């Protein structure tokens, strides 16, 4: 017993040190994982009229799930419009990202700043950078409409001819055909795009079809179109067909139109020559094709606008568990195992299948959670064609009472656009058997009775019935002492290295967080490095008595520092800006004026004057802004 007490006394500190080592390594690992997560916010247009809306996208790179807060900005209104997730597997490495889309609309014209958006990923908080935008008046001319930048041709120097149906039917035209002209905001609507080109032309597509404007979001589109020959008004055409799905951003009546870029090789007939020596051989049409010339035309083929009425979801009859799912769905529920004890987990598997916006399909909910402890559900999505799919959820639930007899019912609510009403799917309860765990070790149901034998054999039978390990009567190998793990050199070395790694990771994390919160720190550091390099070059110019180089370097140094302080482009700062912003008699104003005067008058500055200008410039620019 004394030996066992000694062993226990030495093992307890070792176990505590192992726990401390895990506490050291786990935060470092968490910091390393957190460093792989990146959040950013982007507007699809930095300038937009007050009567138009733009889209704000919050992207989370390196995570499969996240929870952003609603963006905030004085004078701007935000509306959540859905989310998209993406997973990639490239060269054995997987990457995941998720994006959240918000519609942004202003109350009046002016300059606005969207505050940093808080995003929670696996219990950790990240902040996006603030975004500035300009809202123009309605009557502002020349304001680029939202999302117009993405509609420009890939070759900025190549003029594009815009073709619409009815303007040049001889070359080509497009049509977009949605399945419905009246839809709900957020509803997934299938559509078909058809492009027609007259046969005999050589067509090269430079882009996929895209929407004009910002009122609709393209959810999916075929990568390759289906090609076939069709007759339009008795004329042969080559048709290209894409199928996809779209959703509307907000309620109202909006034009739906698409366009795409293409290169056309149009044949121009060469002038036929007169028959030589009266022969008709050269009049053969083969030679017209052989000597024909082709001209390349860069065009934008656009469909005629088609008005789509977008309706908002009704408030009447909206269930409490509705999270934005729109479409037609079915629900299947299963649980495993069906026999368990109190405290044992049960896996609840729920499958939602059908057609609709699966990005807004959340896990179904238990209608009665009394007696159950629930955990967040995980999900997986199997995408099918044109909005069809199957989303499977797995949720761990733990019974806390032996009186439970069933799991559920489980409820999932969605909006049916065809019926125009909310529908709640409720599953049947899943019967389970919950038992109370045993209160103590197993006991014998009847005594062991032996008519013959010894007491040793009786005790052996008792141990076998209770599954006990027999006692060893012979001692094992003896040792003089047991050295605790925390006293071993290699363990102390590993603990010290882990501590230094933790400190280094913590310093890097705090530094990155500080730079992310205030990007001006990094800019200030870069400018200081540039100024130190300029000062060294100015000293070399003073030594060489190179007045022109000194004046150029001195002007650049002053512009860099003042550009940082005033928030201006450094190269755009002139003497007039210094006269307007600096007090009369300021040293930098006097030096800048001397530099400008020397450049125009070609006056010569001696080395003493240049050295004095260098010292004064360095003293003034080194001051904290």
Image: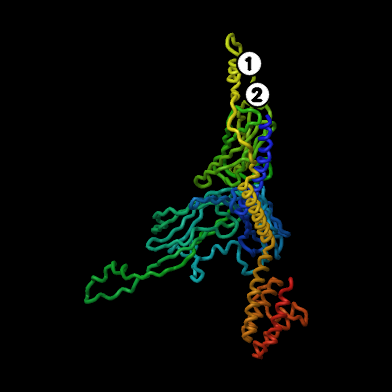
> Under tag 1, what secondary structure?
loop
Residue 441's disc is: 2
Name the outermost residue toward the front.
480
Which is nearer the eye, 15 or 295? Answer: 15
Which is nearer the eye, 305 or 37? Answer: 37
Name the outermost residue toward the top.
451
Quarter occupied by residue 269: bottom left
Q: Tell me if label 2 and label 1 are in contact, CB under 8 Å.
A: no
What residue do we see at 58% from left, 39% from top? 393
Residue 84 at what x, y percent from top left? Answer: 58, 51
Q: Residues within 10 Å of mark 2 (few under 14, many from 20)?
A: few
What residue do we see at 64% from left, 60% from top? 52
Residue 205 at what x, y percent from top left? Answer: 45, 61
Residue 259 showing in the rendered view: yes
Q: Which residue is mark 1?
A: 445
Residue 365 at what x, y percent from top left? Answer: 64, 37
Locate the C terminus by quadrant: bottom right
Q: Relative to residue 467, is residue 270 depicted above or below?
A: below
């Amino acid at each position: 017993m004394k030996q066992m007490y000694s062993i226990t006394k030495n093992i307890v500190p070792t176990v505590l040190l192992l726990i401390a080592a895990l506490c050291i390594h786990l935060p470092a690992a968490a910091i390393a994982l957190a460093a792989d997560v990146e959040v950013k916010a982007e507007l699809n247009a930095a300038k937009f009229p007050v009567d138009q809306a733009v889209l704000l996208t919050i992207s989370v790179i390196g995570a499969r799930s996240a929870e952003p807060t609603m963006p905030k900005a004085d004078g701007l209104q935000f509306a959540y419009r859905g989310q998209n997730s993406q997973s990639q597997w490239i060269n054995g490495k997987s990457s995941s990202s998720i994006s959240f889309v918000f519609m942004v609309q202003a109350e009046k014209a002016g300059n606005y700043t969207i505050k940093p958006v808080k995003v929670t990923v696996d219990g950790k908080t990240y902040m996006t950078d603030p975004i500035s935008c300009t809202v123009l008046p309605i009557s502002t001319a020349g304001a680029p409409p939202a999302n117009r930048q993405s509609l420009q041709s890939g070759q900025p120097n190549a003029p594009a001819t815009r073709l619409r149906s009815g303007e040049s039917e001889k070359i080509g035209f497009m049509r977009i055909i949605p399945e419905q002209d009246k839809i709900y905001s957020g509803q997934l609507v299938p559509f078909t795009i058809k492009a027609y080109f007259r046969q005999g032309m050589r067509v090269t597509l430079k882009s996929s079809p895209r929407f004009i404007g910002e009122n609709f979001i393209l959810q999916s589109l075929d990568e390759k179109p289906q090609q076939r020959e069709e007759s339009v008004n008795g004329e042969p055409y080559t048709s290209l067909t894409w199928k996809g799905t779209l959703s509307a951003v907000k309620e109202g009546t909006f034009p739906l139109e698409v366009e795409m870029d293409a290169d056309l090789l149009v044949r121009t007939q060469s002038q036929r020559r007169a028959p030589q020596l009266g022969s008709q051989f050269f009049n053969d049409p083969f030679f017209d094709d052989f000597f024909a010339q082709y001209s390349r035309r860069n065009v934008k083929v656009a469909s005629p606008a088609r008005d789509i009425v977008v309706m908002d979801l009704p408030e009447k009859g909206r269930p409490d568990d509705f999270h934005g799912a729109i479409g037609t769905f079915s629900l299947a529920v299963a649980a495993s195992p069906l026999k368990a004890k109190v405290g044992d987990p049960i896996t609840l598997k729920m499958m939602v299948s059908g057609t609709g916006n699966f990005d807004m399909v959340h896990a179904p909910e238990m209608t009665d959670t009394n007696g159950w402890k629930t955990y967040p559900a995980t999900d997986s999505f199997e995408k099918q064609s044109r909005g069809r799919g199957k989303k499977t959820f797995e949720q761990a639930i733990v019974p806390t009472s032996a009186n439970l007899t069933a799991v559920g019912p489980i409820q999932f609510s969605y909006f049916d656009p065809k019926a125009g009403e909310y529908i709640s799917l409720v599953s049947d309860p899943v019967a389970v058997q919950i038992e109370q765990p045993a209160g103590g070790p197993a006991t014998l149901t009847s005594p062991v009775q032996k008519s013959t034998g010894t007491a040793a054999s009786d005790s052996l039978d008792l141990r076998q019935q209770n599954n006990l390990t027999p006692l060893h009567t012979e001692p094992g190998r003896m040792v003089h002492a047991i050295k605790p793990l925390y006293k071993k050199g290699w363990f102390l070395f590993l603990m010290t290295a882990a501590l230094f790694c933790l400190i280094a990771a913590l310093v890097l994390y705090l530094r990155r967080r500080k730079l992310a919160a205030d990007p001006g720190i990094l800019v200030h550091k870069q400018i200081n490095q540039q100024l130190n390099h300029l000062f060294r070059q100015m000293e070399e110019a003073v030594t060489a008595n190179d007045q022109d180089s000194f004046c150029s370097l001195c002007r650049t140094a002053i512009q860099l520092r003042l550009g940082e302080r005033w928030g201006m482009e450094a190269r755009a700062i002139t003497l007039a800006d210094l006269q307007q912003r600096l007090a009369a008699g300021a040293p930098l104003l006097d030096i800048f004026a001397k530099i400008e005067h020397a450049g125009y008058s070609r006056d010569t500055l001696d080395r003493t004057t240049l050295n004095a200008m260098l010292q004064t410039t360095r003293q003034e620019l080194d001051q904290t802004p």
